[in-house]
Amino acid sequence: MLRVIFTLLLCVSLPACLSPSQKFQHSAESYGFYPKQIWGENFLHRLFLNKAVLNTPQKKILHVYLDGDGTPWKSNRWVSADPTSRNPIVLELINLDSSPSILLGRPCYHGLKNKFCEPKYWTSDRYSERVVNSLTTVLNKFLLENPYEKVVLIGYSGGGTLAALMARNIININTLVTIAANFDIEKWTHFHDYLPLTNSLNPINFPPLPASIKQIHFAGLKDENIPAEIIKNFSDKQVNAVFYPITDFNHHCCWVSHWQKLLTQVIY
C-alpha cells in the first residue's frame, strides 16, 4: 500500500505523468503566461495572456496566436481523448514576442470538455462553422473588454487555417499571419490519403479576404506535412497577400529559432 501511495505521489510531481492539457498549462505557466477562460458558442475556451498584455496600459497592437491541430488521432487509428498539442511550438513563439500577445485556445482542447465536446470537433469537424464561430465569438468578447487599435492574427498549421476562416469577422483586424497553414483541406487529405474532413470549411473555396487585411503566409519548402504549393495557391488568390517561402524550413523547424527576426523584419 505504501508503495502504491508513493508511486501516485511521485507521478503527480512528474511532468511525464501529466495529461497533454496539464503539460501545456504547465509550460504556459513556466513562461509566465496568465490563463483565462471565456465562453464561446456552446464551448468554453482557455486563453493564455503574456505579461505585456497585463503590463501595457496603451492598447495599440495585440497579437493573437492560434495553435495547430495537436493530436486529433493516436497512431492515425484511434481518436485521441485529449487533442491538445504535445509539442506546443506556439508557446515558444509567444514567449519570443515582446508585443501584447494571447493564445486563443480551441474548443474542447486544454481539458475544457463539456456535453457539446464530441470527438468530431477535433477530427472531421475541426474547421467547422461551429468551431470557427465559437473562436470568433471568444476573441471578439475579449476585444470588446480590451479594445486594441490593431489586431494581428497569427496561426500555426491548423491554427492558420482557422485564423484565415475567422479573419473577416474579427474586430479591428489589421494583419493575418500564417505559418505552414492548411489552406486546402481537400487537397491535403488526398495528399496524405487521410479521411476527408467532412463538415469542415475549406479556406481555398472562400472569396478573397478584404484588401484592408494585410496577409503574410509563411511556408517551409521542406514541409512534408503541408506542401508549400497549398499555401501559395491560397496566397495567390488573395488581394493583399505575400507568400513567403523559406528554403530550409519544414513543418516544425526552424520557426522558433527565427521567429524574432521574422517578426521584426517581415511582419513590421
Image (cartoon, rainbow, N blue to C red):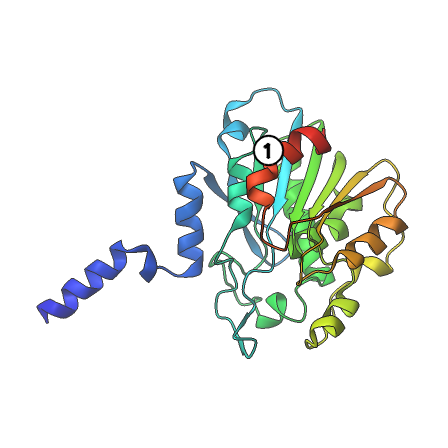
Q: Which residue is mark 1?
A: 260
Q: Is residue 198 visible?
A: no
Between residue 164 and residue 186, name the one nearer to us.
186
Residue at 45% x, 44% y is 28
Residue at 77% x, 63% y is 201
The type of residue carrying mark 1 is: Gln
Report the quarter where the N terminus lies.
Answer: bottom left
Report the quarter where the C terminus lies.
Answer: top right
Identify the residue at the far bottom of this view.
77
The percent position of residue 141, horizontal first and vertical second, equals: 64, 41
What is the secondary structure assignment of the residue under circle 1? helix
The percent position of residue 262, horizontal first and vertical second, equals: 66, 35
Between residue 189 and residue 52, name the one nearer to us.
189
Q: Is residue 16 shown left or right of residue 180?
A: left
Identify the residue at the far left of this view.
2
How busy is the neighbourhood of tag 1: few (under 14 within 10 Å), some, or many (20 plus)?
some
Q: Is residue 259 shown left or right of residue 187?
A: left
Between residue 226 and residue 159, name the one nearer to us.
226
Between residue 179 and residue 143, name the one nearer to us.
179
Residue at 74% x, 41% y is 176
Determine whether 228 is above or below 190 in the image. above
Determine whether 46 is above or below 190 in the image. above
Residue at 25% x, 54% y is 13
